[in-house]
Amino acid sequence: MQAEAHETMAHMTQDLDRASAGALRRECGLVTPPSGWWRWLGDAHVLASLLAALPVWLALGMTMGGRMQVAHTWGAWLSLVLVQPIAEELVFRGVLQGQLLRLGGTRGAGPFTWANLATTAGFVGLHLISQPLAWALAIAAPSLLLGHLRERFGSVLPAVFVHAFFNAGFGLVALVARA
């Protein structure tokens, strides 16, 4: 009898652990978007995000030109296009924004939630460490957009993809401007 009770308690604890882990994954956006792994690519907000990058890249190439940092090695490209977007989105849009949303940051100013605005402030602050002030402040607009995508889909996956796309474009513009 005591062994059965102990086994039942162990199963309940495992179920609770699994439920808690599942809730934490959802809160942090570490889930498949409700529309599936790739359907969100056709979403108007995602497509508009991708298209909005084109004039920004063109303007950067024309104004900053050869002053942009260039990724010269495969490792640098891998970092720019995969490592940085994944790490930054998991930390900022996943953990930070997810927890702020959970704590009540769902209301906001205009179209943006307080969670998104606070996350963007942190994201800009991080970029101030290694970027000039104007560049770090310019990152606020894409950060708000990435936060919107995270909230729209309940997942960081679309934000990671768009962030990687943005970084790849910046890298290509820098490379072409230096050529």
Image (spheres, rainbow, N blue to C red):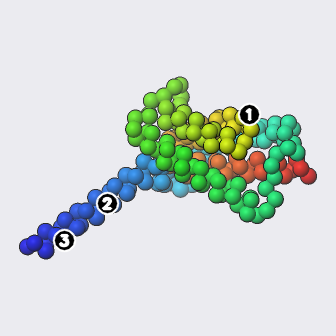
**Secondary structure type for disc 3:** helix
* Residue that carries the numbered disc 1 in the rendered image: 134
**Secondary structure type for disc 2:** helix
Q: Residue furthest left?
A: 1
Q: Position of residue 144 (x, y in %)?
A: 59, 36
Residue drawn at x 13%, y 72% as measured from the top left: 4
Where residue 17 is drawn, which disc sits there?
2
- Front in this rendered view, residue 141 or 42: 141
Q: Position of residue 171 (x, y in %)?
A: 77, 51
Contact, CB < 8 Å: mark 1 with mark 2?
Answer: no
Q: Amino acid under label 2?
A: Asp
Q: In 3D space, how far apart are the residues under numbered discs 2 and 3 (Cα atoms)?
A: 15 Å
Q: Amino acid under label 3?
A: Glu
Residue drawn at x 73%, y 52% as measured from the top left: 168
Q: Position of residue 178 (x, y in %)?
A: 89, 50
Residue drawn at x 44%, y 34% as measured from the top left: 105
Q: Of the residues tagged 3 and 1, which is closer to the observer?
A: 1
- Front in this rendered view, residue 148 or 43: 148
Answer yes or no: is residue 160 visible. Answer: no
Q: Position of residue 34 (x, y in %)?
A: 46, 50
Q: Residue furthest top?
A: 110
Q: Quadrant of residue 121?
A: top right
* Residue that carries the numbered disc 3 in the rendered image: 7
Q: In 3D space, how far apart are the residues under numbered discs 3 and 1 (Cα atoms)?
A: 60 Å
- Front in this rendered view, residue 179 or 162: 179
Residue drawn at x 54%, y 39% as measured from the top left: 119
